[in-house]
Image: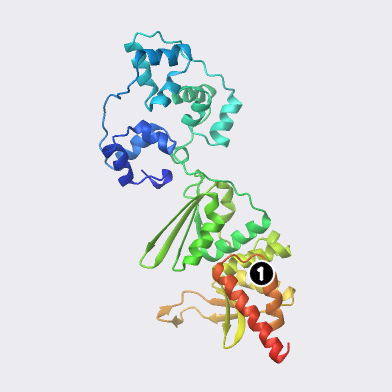
Amino acid sequence: MTKRIGISKRKLESLYLKKGLSSYKIAKIYKCDPGVVQRRLKEHNIPLIYKKEKIIISKKRLYDLYVNKCLSTYKIANLFGCRSTTIYYRLKEYEINTRHKKIVSIPKGKLKKLYWKEELSLSQISERYDCSPSAILGKLKKYKISRRNRSEANISYPKKPFEGDLIMKSYMIGFRIGDLHVKKKKPSHKTITVNSNTTKLAQVKLIKEVFGCYGHFYTKERRGVYEIYCQLDKSFSFLVPKKDNIPKWILNNKRYFFSFLAGYTDAEGCIKVNQGRARYRIGSYDKNLLKQIYNKLTEFNLYPRYILETRAGTIYSGVKMNGDFWRVSVNKKSALLKLFSLLEPYIKHSTKIEDLKIAKNNILERIERFGG
């Protein structure tokens, strides 16, 4: 089964072939339709086993559930982990008179909300109305409510919509521009995919902390490199476009800007003590972006420097630079203290937090020794 519903081929073979669970029972575990499980079996070339479901239920027990307690065949099937048709055939076998087909009463607006807005599956909706998924499908057709495509219908990882404020949104945009690849495979898809590669475990933990609480987070390590993937709700569409400029609503607000800069710093920045002096630097090929950061830092009297550090075509450490590499830095003691105080509430990277503390202590010690 594909990663969308979080079950590997090995796990599927274990459940279906070794443990002998039916596609219905596996579907209950992963909260999807049996048809989804059967499609995944075919995708992994696992042979389908067509066998009559055997359930242990006496005529007296079935009569009590169906006639006396008025449970539906679908509800009884849930109790015994089988299909509703299996219960129906058992009723016929025991010569228990069946009731007329239940008329499901659900308004069009309510069904459309459950199916499209809340993104419930046919099985989940049918459980609420004590009927079969086919009954809900019939209602969709009757009301002429369009069906979700297979990609949308098969998503079973729980996803939370973005619930943060504009400060968190600013941080995420800054971090995304610096270190993340974000995409939506097709315009019709609702899942936003975030991925990144890093050799630093602290970076893995940071991405999980920031984005992992909103959707499925997955990472694997190969030869010291961590590959990170996260699937997010469509409300994170603001992360998809990677622009070479900072949005105006961020530039026009002091807190939003420094939250953005904190995110960009966690991804691309460097806070270090070099040759006995604390320094702050960020560098990239995004000339326009760094120019905007330089201008904003200048507005706050932080005395930044903005330079072309390496020209395109330069061979650096055996690698040819494909573009001009630009750098913004702050070195003055008073300016660094002010900058750190503005960044500190928003920095989230554990290593950067520790580096910032070390840099601040270095500045304070130098001021005490030499004056400031």
- Quadrant of res 304: bottom right
> Which color scheme did the rendering employ for the protein?
rainbow
**Looking at the picture, does residue 250 appear above or below residue 339?**
above
Depth check: 371 or 35 in front?
A: 371
Query: At which x and y percent is residue 269?
Result: 57, 72
Residue 122 percent coordinates (x, y): 48, 30
The answer to which quarter of the image holds residue 221 is: bottom left
Question: Is 118 left, or right, of 74 in this rendering?
Answer: right
Q: Give percent across and percent down for residue 167.
A: 67, 58
x%, y% of residue 317?
Answer: 42, 81
Helix, strand or loop under label 1: helix
Which residue corresponds to mark 1? 343
Would you place residue 17 above or below residue 111 in this image?
Answer: below
Q: Quadrant of residue 343?
A: bottom right
Tell me if residue 104 comes above or below residue 254 in the rendering: above
- Amino acid type shown at disc 1: Leu
